[in-house]
Every structure is written in C-alpha cells, then in structure tokens.
Amino acid sequence: MTHDITSLSVVPFPRDLTIALRSRIREAIELAFAEELEAALGAGPSERVEGRAGYRNGSVTRPVLTQHGRHELTIPRARLFQEDGATGEWRSELVGRYQRRTKQIDDALVGCYLAGANTRRIRRALAPLFGERHLSRSAISRI
C-alpha cells in the first residue's frame, strides 16, 4: 500500500507555536507590570486600603522589541503621592519611559556592528525579528 504525499495537508505548527508563545510572553510581561504597580501603590485595582500610595491612571500601549519579537505591551499608568503633598507619575523599572527595545537587542546590535557588519547587513540579518518595522541605518549607528 502506498501513500500519496501530495494529498497530505501540512500544518504550519512551528509558526502557530511561535505566535502562541509570543502572546504568552506578552501576557507574562503585562502581569509583571501589574504586580510591580500593585507593590508601588500598596493596593490592588479598586481596593480601598489605609495608607494607599497613589491611584491608577489608565494605561498606554507601546511597541517594545524583545529577543522574542515585537510586542504591543499595555503598560499601566499611576500617580503616586509624594512627601510634599504633590503627585508624581509612576515609572516602571521593567521598561524605561521611552524604551522601545530591550537591552539584549541593543547588545546584539552593538555586537554585530563591532564584528564588522555594516548597518544594511544588520538590518537584513535581524529582519525576521524586527518585521516590517525595521530600524533605520542612523538608529543602528546611534545604538
């Protein structure tokens, strides 16, 4: 008995697995943001507590490039009470205020550049990671 290989449908499992893992990574990072904010405020969402350190103030969506690809992260915002009675904006220690790439990505770019690769080769080599929104030559040089 012979099997016709052309009639078998091939399921793109590794691609679907990558997409599933990327969404889980995004969820894990956002959970870490929520836990970090809860620790800073001293209270969970909608929780009434004595000695609360501030209040939640919505969220902002920001694209961040990690070694696992580009993620659209939802970063919570909050206002923290200061000693002088004013309020200040809460800043996450996981991702800096204007940070769009992780330190590992910057280190990889610097390593490629110092190894002698020019900016065009770096862009082509990292195209699967960056996707369509690649870094410009000047951005690679600045890093």
Image (cartoon, helix red, strand yellow):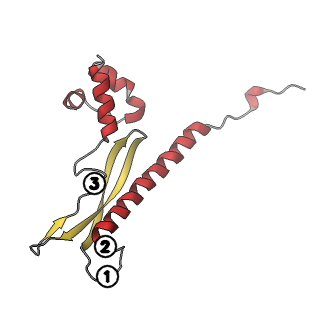
Determine whether 11 is above or below 55 in the image: above
> Which residue is disc 2 drawn over?
42
Q: Quadrant of the C terminus?
A: top left
**Image quarter of residue 31:** bottom left
Q: Residue at x 32, y 67 (%)?
A: 39
Marked residue nearer the N-terminal end (2 or 3): 2
**Image quarter of residue 104:** top left
Q: Nearer the viewer, residue 107 or 133?
A: 107
The image position of residue 55, as x and y in percent, is 25, 73
Q: Nearer the viewer, residue 41 or 20?
A: 41
**Three-letter amino acid code at disc 1?**
Val
Horizontal arrangement in the rendering, residue 21 relative to residue 128 (left or right) = right
Label count reads 3
**Local SS, label 2:** loop
Q: Residue at x 52, y 41 (%)?
A: 18
**Local SS, label 3:** loop
Horizontal arrangement in the rendering, residue 103 relative to residue 4 (left or right) = left
Q: Are marks 2 and 3 in contact (CB under 8 Å)?
A: no
> Which residue is disc 3 drawn over?
93
The image position of residue 46, as x and y in percent, is 35, 78
> Which residue is disc 1 drawn over?
49
**Three-letter amino acid code at disc 2?**
Gly
Distance CA(mark 3)–CA(mark 1) = 24 Å
